[in-house]
Amino acid sequence: MKSRRSAEIDEATRLNSACREQNGSLLHGGRRLALAGHFSEAASLLRRTVAEEPASADAWYALGFCESMLENRHAAEAACQRALQLAPYHFDARLGLGLLLLERDDLDGWRHVVWAGVQWEYQQLAEKRPKPPSTLWRGDFDETPVWRDSSLTDLLDSVQRLADELSETKSSGEEEPPYCRDRTSSEFRDRAAANAEAARRFLLPIAESSSFTLDSVTPELICKVHRILCDGVPFLDTPHSPLTPRHWLGVFRSRQLFAGALCPPSPSQILPLLVALIAYLKRVQNDGAHPLVVATLTQHYLLVLHPFYDGNGRLARTIGAFLAAMRDERGRGGITMRNFYLLAKHYQSERETFGYCGRLSIRGEQTLLPYLRLAAQGAYQGLQAIRMNSAGHNRSPELATTR
């Protein structure tokens, strides 16, 4: 009886024959084998493909991908370079070659190769739809005391009452893998969720200690959390993606980059602005702001600072959850003690709205009050859900049958 692997290869070979009859190409079968994870067999078919169709940039790129998965780095680079010679703006080939250059620490080569493709992609998009205006953050913090707004403080009081009520019950809210459901790659989801749990275990004991203050949030701690969150996570949200380069883990970026329409500060400003951010948060805290406000502001400014090449969203949401677990001198806080990634899940579900409010604030078109209200509403809804679940789990069998 044939094994499953043998059956898949036979099926790909049959499809190759059918494909050759239709258009004389082996590319389709090679791709199917690669998607099934049979990179050696796929590479063999794709070598025949490029021999028969040497002008096919797609075939050369597919061959380069398979060679990279087989760790034949030189052959992979040569195949991707050939694809770019045939189609200079083949974006997948540019990205693949860029990742291979990163693996041998050639940052300048990576930037040159990938950036040319990105510029071309943006040019194509600009012809189809208006390009969003660039948002440049110059390192200034919003000093408007919006945390004193009466509607916001009333909502925060409701959040605090719920958090205090839940802290007195024995059962805890169910913790689910955070902000990973929108990812298509199971490799990304599984590893990112495991790393998020590792970060939670690392940070919660610090948050629960009596000495926990804003001074606990140091650049060293931020780098440590980034290293935990991104270690072993695929760089791209695709099957068989290369992992995030190890020399990026816990290391501030050394090149200027763009995050969508956001232009974050230059690398030389990252460390000074992190220090300035902590000083700003202390001023906000001393003005009587709720710990949830401090946590939300931290998340927002870490996102616009964008201190790392990758994983900035995960980092910002995790540090925000960390600070939302803190209690101030008045005993307020502890919002995320029951479900550490409560706020992160809400942010992920309302990502577009948070991003819109944040961009308007950076441009000076409005304050951060809508951003803070959105976070407080999410905290309230999340805590309400935890209370309802706890009530259901704590209900006795007799009571459950009579209701």
Image: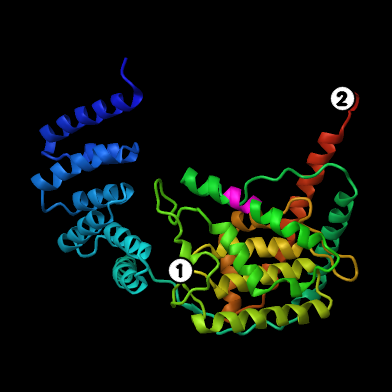
Left or right of 399? Residue 259 is left
194 in magenta: yes
Left or right of 293? Residue 188 is left
Name the residue rendered at 20%, 55% in the picture.
Answer: 79
Name the colouring of the figure.
rainbow
Amino acid type at circle 2 is Pro
Provide the residue designation for mark 1: 260
Q: Is residue 71 above or below residue 32?
A: below
Left or right of 154? Residue 265 is left
Residue 314: % across, % down:
58, 60
Residue 43: % across, % down:
23, 43
Provide the residue designation for mark 2: 397
Name the image quarter holding residue 121. bottom left
Name the image quarter holding residue 155. bottom right
Residue 353: % across, % down:
59, 63
Secondary structure under badge 1? loop
Amino acid type at circle 1 is Gly
User: Looking at the image, is mark 1 or mark 2 earlier in the sequence?
Assistant: 1
Q: Local crowd at mark 1 within 10 Å, few (<14), some, or many (≥20)?
A: few
Q: Is residue 73 above or below residue 29?
A: below
Would you say residue 85 is visible in this rendering?
Answer: yes
130 in magenta: no
Q: Local crowd at mark 2 within 10 Å, few (<14), some, or many (≥20)?
A: few
Q: Which residues are magenta?
A: 193-197
Q: How many marks?
A: 2
Tell me the chief SS of the magenta region.
helix
Mark 1–mark 2 distance (CA, rounded to whole Å): 52 Å
Name the residue rendered at 54%, 45% in the picture.
Answer: 190
The front one of 334 and 375 is: 334
Residue 218: % across, % down:
68, 74
